[in-house]
Every structure is written in C-alpha cells, then in structure tokens.
Amino acid sequence: MAVYVDHMRAPFRGMIMCHMLADTIDELHDMADRIGMPRRAFQNRPGGTPHYDITWERRALAVESGAVEIGRRQVVAIIRQYRGLTSSDGSSPSASRSARIPNYGQTTPSPPHHP
C-alpha cells in the first residue's frame, strides 16, 4: 500500500500545486494529516478519483514521510484502475470495484500484460 504524489506543477492563487493519491482512502487521509492538510481539501466527487491537491511545499513533506513520486502515465494508470476501467493485468474489469487500487510505486512503470 502506498501514497503517491505526481510531478504536476499547476499554478493556483500564487502557489504551485500537484496531486496526492493513495491505494486506499485511509492511507490518503493519514498522509494528509501528517503533512497538515485540512480534511476540507479532500476531493472525492462522483466519478472522480479521491485525492488532495497539495502545494509543492507539502509535496516535499509527503515525500519525506514516504510518499512515492510518480509520473503522468502512472497517475493515469492509477485513475483508470480506481475507476475500474482496467484490471491490474490489463484485462477487462470485474463486476465489483475494489476499494484498493494497485501499487504503482515502481520507478519505471511496467507495460501492461495483454494475454
């Protein structure tokens, strides 16, 4: 299980922001608490992916606390997996969506296996 931060650099009200995601919502909230994110900053709209938008300063704190830095392709893979669009082996999703998404903490993403 892991918490992830991406490399996005989106300007917002004088700050530079990125995303923080996790394998589970509990892990996400735990990390948010550790880096001082208020719960009201949690985003979980219907059809979306649970995450926090965090400043680069808080991103550094998250990485120091064990968050894994990931790139855009890994973010997309996590989002697709969370939404049930693909399974971890690249096949069609099962009828029930898991509360956990796969661990994408590897430095270089592996290509999906297509049987």
Image (tube, helix red, strand yellow):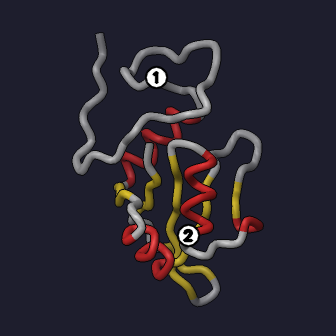
Instruction: Residue at 36%, 47% (x, y): give it.
Output: 73
Instruction: Residue at 54%, 62% (x, y): give it.
Output: 31
Instruction: Residue at 36%, 21% (x, y): give it.
Output: 89
Provide residue 113's location: percent of width, then percent of height. 28, 20
Q: Is 73 rendered above or below residue 113?
A: below
Counting residues from the start of the chain, the first of labels 1 and 2 encountered is: 2
Q: Is 86 rendered above or below residue 75?
A: above
Q: Is residue 76 left or right of residue 54?
A: left
Provide residue 66's location: percent of width, then percent of height. 38, 62
For label 1, the residue is 87
Q: Compare residues 73 and 42 and report the one nearer the observer.
A: 42
Residue placed farthest to the bottom in the image? Answer: 14
Tell me where residue 43 sits by quadrant. bottom right
Q: Is 101 rendered above or below residue 5?
A: above
Look at the numbered disc 2 and give the secondary structure of its residue: helix
Residue placed farthest to the top in the image? Answer: 115
Q: Which mark is residue 2?
A: none
Instruction: Residue at 46%, 53% (x, y): give it.
Output: 3
Q: Amino acid at mark 2?
A: Arg
Q: Is residue 71 left or right of residue 42?
A: left
Query: Circle 2: is it few (<14), some (14-19), or many (20+) Cα within 10 Å?
Result: few
Q: How many marks?
A: 2
Look at the numbered disc 1 and give the secondary structure of its residue: loop
Tell me where residue 91 sits by quadrant. top left
Instruction: State if disc 2 and disc 1 touch (CB < 8 Å).
Output: no
Provide residue 46's location: percent of width, then percent of height. 76, 42
- In the rendered image, the quadrant that contains the N terminus is top left
Query: Circle 1: is it few (<14), some (14-19), or many (20+) Cα within 10 Å?
Result: many
CA–CA distance in space, label 1 to label 2: 31 Å
For label 2, the residue is 34
Q: Amino acid at mark 1?
A: Ser
